[in-house]
Amino acid sequence: MRPDSPSIGRKLTWLSTLSSAAALLAASLALIFYDRLDARRAMVQRLQTISAMIAFNSAAALDFNDADAAEGVLASLKTRPNVVSAGIFVNGKLFARYLRDKKQPGMTPPVLENERGHRFTDQHLFVFQPITSEARTLGTLYLQSDLLEISQRLRRYIAIIGTVAVAAVLLTVLISWRLQAGISRPILDLAALAQTVSQEKDYSVRAPGVRSVAEVEQLVSTFNQMLVQIQQQHADLEESRSTLEQRVADRTRELAAANKELEAFSYSVSHDLRAPLRAIDGFSKALIADYADKPLDQRGRHFLERVRAGTQKMSGLIDDMLHLARVTRSSLERKDVDVTAVAKEVCAELTRHHPDRQVQCHIEEGLRTFADSHLLTIVFENLLGNAWKFTAQKDLARIDIGEQNTGQDPVFYVRDNGAGFDMAYAAKLFGAFQRLHDDSEFEGTGIGLATVQRIINRHGGHISAEAEEGRGAVFYFTLGGSS
């Protein structure tokens, strides 16, 4: 807490004072506004009454074209000190006039003529009244009055309201000062207790009960309950801390042992298992070569070929397992990637390795994403490699690579018109060493799609597939972000 921060008591006092002052100010402004409107309305009514009487009295003078008589009627306005000037206009020309101050310039008729009405300006009120006789309009009477009466009345109201406001504010301060002690004092005591608990870490202290407003009493009770819970949690934490180091040491030893076992397994896969497989493969080839022209029945040669095929397949499985492990452990380095270029490069590589195949590879232009370029290349190598493999029995093989815009992350797809698969077994599609076709139809180890799924998952994306037997398959995937 800053040293210069005001106390809650002072804030409550200011809040009460400002609230009362704001309410009083709003009421005073409303009263002044209403009174001003009422004063203006009364002034208009009064001048319109006077103008009607003068118009009636001056009708005969206009009828006989007697300007002196008309000015005599207007001279009666001397008893009205607020009337600055008056004039009678006939056909737009001044017929007679009255000036409170003889030095002021002559009167110019307002725009509206021959109509009864009024108009306020910043400093004056104009009232105009038609002068009629036997339904004939003889001219128009104009009165010009100052607004001094309204200004004086406004000043009196402001003085009265200011006096009442000062008294009301002082009374509010006195009342709030007497009442806020019952609210702020328990809260200030509670704040001091909280500071003591924070500095000394003593959770056994409790706030004393108070007699105050319901909210403050509830605050004190809740604070005491919180201290009880913190004290219990602190005791539990101290108890757990005593065994934490031992538990961490145990978990560390277990993790180290698991890592050693994993390293041993990797070493065994890459060295211990591969070495005998190479020996079996080498001896099998030597046996076939040495006994090619010697008596060795067909059954024996078949068995030797099976041994070689098995060892080669096991070697391929080991390579795929190690590749899958490397993909899982490798670091992820995202950057802007030209997906179209990656797909074209993979398709070109497949074409070079299978020059006897005629495959139409249609790749949408302008495909981009934000991903690890190396891992994305592995994704297309597996997906396009599968599409290339499963379209081998088609006379006209076709592979399409493109993007679907869903309004969120871009959804890429790889579609082929190959063998497809039964969607009833789609749940096994991305499992390691899971295959939906027999080796006699299409070769493979079942690692490719598992590798693809792990790469997609590492990017925060999703992969799915749709297919129909004999009509091809399509794989959809996202990479967890757009370019």
Image (tube, helix red, strand yellow):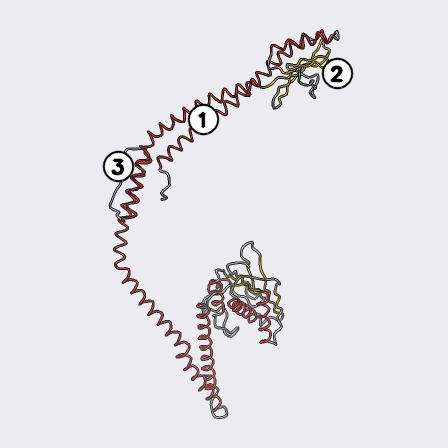
Identity of the residue drawn at 26% across and 37% down: 209
Which disc number belongs to residue 24? Answer: 1
Q: Separation of disc 3 and disc 1 at Cα?
A: 38 Å
Q: Quadrant of residue 357?
A: bottom right
Q: Position of residue 188 (x, y in %)?
A: 31, 38
Q: Separation of disc 2 and disc 1 at Cα?
A: 53 Å
Crowding near pointer 2: few (<14 within 10 Å), some, many (20+)?
A: few
Residue farthest toward the bottom in the current orientation of the protein: 294
Q: Nearer the viewer, mark 3 or mark 1?
A: 1
Residue farthest toward the front in the current orientation of the protein: 103
Crowding near pointer 3: few (<14 within 10 Å), some, many (20+)?
A: few
Q: Position of residue 98 (x, y in %)?
A: 67, 13
- The answer to whether residue 467 of the structure is visible from this angle is no
Tag 3 and tag 1, C-beta contact below 8 Å: no
- 432 over 51 or under it: above or below: below
Q: Amino acid under label 3?
A: Gly
Earlier-in-chain disc, 3 versus 1: 1
- 79 over 177 or under it: above or below: above
Tell me if 92 is positioned left or right of 100 in this view. right
Crowding near pointer 1: few (<14 within 10 Å), some, many (20+)?
A: some
Q: Secondary structure at mark 1?
A: helix
Quarter occupied by the N terminus? top left
Earlier-in-chain disc, 2 versus 1: 1
Number of marks in the image? 3
Tell me if 158 is positioned left or right of 261 in this view. right
Which disc number belongs to residue 209? Answer: 3
Q: Quadrant of residue 239?
A: bottom left
Q: Amino acid under label 1?
A: Leu
